[in-house]
Image (cartoon, rainbow, N blue to C red):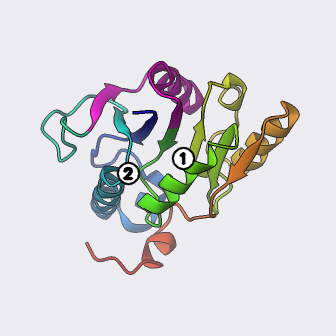
Amino acid sequence: MQNALITFIKNPIRGQGKTRLAADVGDEKALRIYLALMDHTRKVAQQVHANRYLFYDQYIDTADSWSSLLFQKHLQSDGDLGARMENAFSLALQQHQKVMIIGSDCAQLTPDIISHAFESLNNHDVVIGPALDGGYYLIGMKRLYPFLFQDMPWSSDTVFTETQRRIKQHNLSWDKGPTLSDIDYATDWETYGWTI
């Protein structure tokens, strides 16, 4: 299989993760929302024609709903988000021609969006799915470009713009997916009308 799909998740622990959302709705509801988002992401990933990698942030859970038959389970490396993503890409690119990474907090993500992004890599060096908050929910490439991950202002509204600038600076060809919304605040969640 030439395609690899990497999913980054946080181990669902009450009071950890989705801190901006928790500030709006409380730790308990924030955890339930994140569990719903993870469930959505898992179902999306399972429909994509690719080898699937799952990277946990704290520990590998062998008994959760992410089947070890469908996902190769790994632990994220040390360092900031960029270092962890770079490490995951480096691992997957050793065995696959096209590698893409997604997060687990985008309710609008669909299998078609990911499949089209893989197709875009046939003609481009990099593909990115920008998020409304200025970051991105997806990035894919055919070879490792460390400069896209190092010294990046993560968790800011300039991540996508800075990534775009670096791509152009290094004369890489790139394509852009649809702009989607991550779930960071209660208003983001309420937009979808999901019940938990």
The magenta region covers 71-99
The amino acid pointed to by label 2 is Val
Q: Considering depth in this image, is 15 or 97 the residue closer to the camera?
A: 97
Element on which disc 2 rests: loop
Quadrant in which residue 25 is drawn: bottom left
Q: Which residue is mark 1?
A: 118
Tag of residue 48: 2
The amino acid pointed to by label 1 is Phe
Vertical relation: 170 (above or below) 173: above
Q: Provide residue 101's location: percent of width, then percent of height.
A: 50, 40
Element on which disc 1 rests: helix
Quadrant in which residue 35 is drawn: bottom left
Q: Is residue 108 visible?
A: yes
Please say whether residue 1 is one of the residues in the magenta stretch: no
Do tag 2 and tag 1 residues touch (Cβ < 8 Å)? yes
* Quadrant placement of the C terminus: bottom left
Q: Residue at x 28, y 30 (%)?
A: 73
Q: Residues within 10 Å of mark 2 (few under 14, many from 20)?
A: some
